[in-house]
Amino acid sequence: MAVEFGTVAEWTADVVDELGDEYAIVAGCRGSGDPALLDWLAQACEVGPESALLDVGAGLGGAAAWAAEAYGVNPVLVDPMEAACRAVRRMFDRSAVCARGETLPYADNRFDVVWCIGVLCTVHDKPALLRELCRVLRPGGSLGMMVLVAGSGLHSEVPDGNEFPSADELRGLVAEAGFAWRRLSETPSGSTPTEWRRRADRVDELLAKRHGDDPRWQESEQRSQMLSHLLTTRQVTAQLVHAVKSVGSVP
């Protein structure tokens, strides 16, 4: 995780500097989603220009920047990695607060929507993270997540730093944190736009060209290949979550 959202984050910002701003959102979404996934979350959470949106574990900021462009929202970004926060500023000219999701520096009931994309399965203390997401949401506010969920046949090696909950565990964790369930859905199966794929491939090609011999890049690629295998063999599935903060939840 330190390599992927540290060293590789800064390398990715370097690549965007060379390729141009039109590559920034795609580069910032490497491993965290595509337009169909993000649109599902935005519509489920009713994101709009007046929404106070917090993206927790925002990484390089691609998902938040996409929401700003597509839905006119002005998101707040938080990530625990300083290098990722620097990359957000370089790529999108946005501020990103360096903080852990389990200890957010915001008041109770501050946000209308909280996104947490691809983060829960990388956190050991999942109840603490979910309680904090609930605390900063206003009553009735929406939680949108993408979570990698373990199937009953999970047997392959799991990348260090990943702890995949089962679907039942996920439902229980979300409910216990003070949320009411709305939807749990497998990520949309629609094809990624051709131009999005082209830009993503170009970013990957340039990263590999520049850093392919670096052990840190090789480590990042190994993690990516392991996750791809788990997803392809359906030992793990990417699930989209929409839940709302229960009106009676205590901050």
Image (cartoon, grey):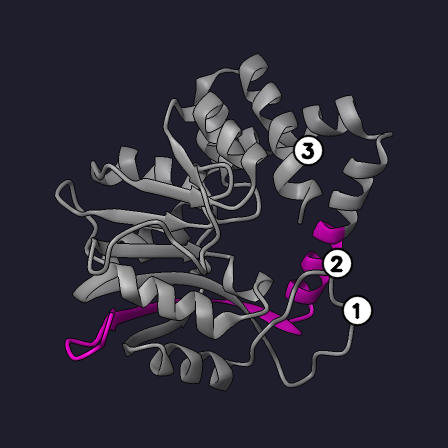
Q: Nearer the viewer, residue 216 or 229?
A: 216
Q: Position of residue 180 (x, y in %)?
A: 26, 79
Q: Residue at x 29, y 51 (%)?
A: 106
The quarter of the displayed image where residue 182 is located: bottom left
Q: Amino acid at mark 2?
A: Met
Mark 3 or mark 2, earlier in chain = 3
Q: Nearer the viewer, mark 3 or mark 2?
A: 3
Q: Are marks 2 and 1 in contact (CB under 8 Å)?
A: yes
Quadrant housing the C terminus: bottom left
Q: Which mark is residue 7?
A: 3
C-alpha span from label 2 to label 1: 8 Å
Q: Nearer the viewer, residue 176 or 98?
A: 98
Tell me if I can see residue 44 in this picture: no
Q: Which contiguous range is marked in magenta?
A: 223-251
Q: Amino acid at mark 1?
A: Glu
Q: Which mark is residue 101?
A: none
Residue 242 colored in magenta in the image: yes
Q: Residue at x 54, y 29 (%)?
A: 199
SS assignment at label 2: helix
Would you name the residue on which mark 2 appears? 226
Mark 2 or mark 1, earlier in chain = 1
Residue 125 colored in magenta in the image: no
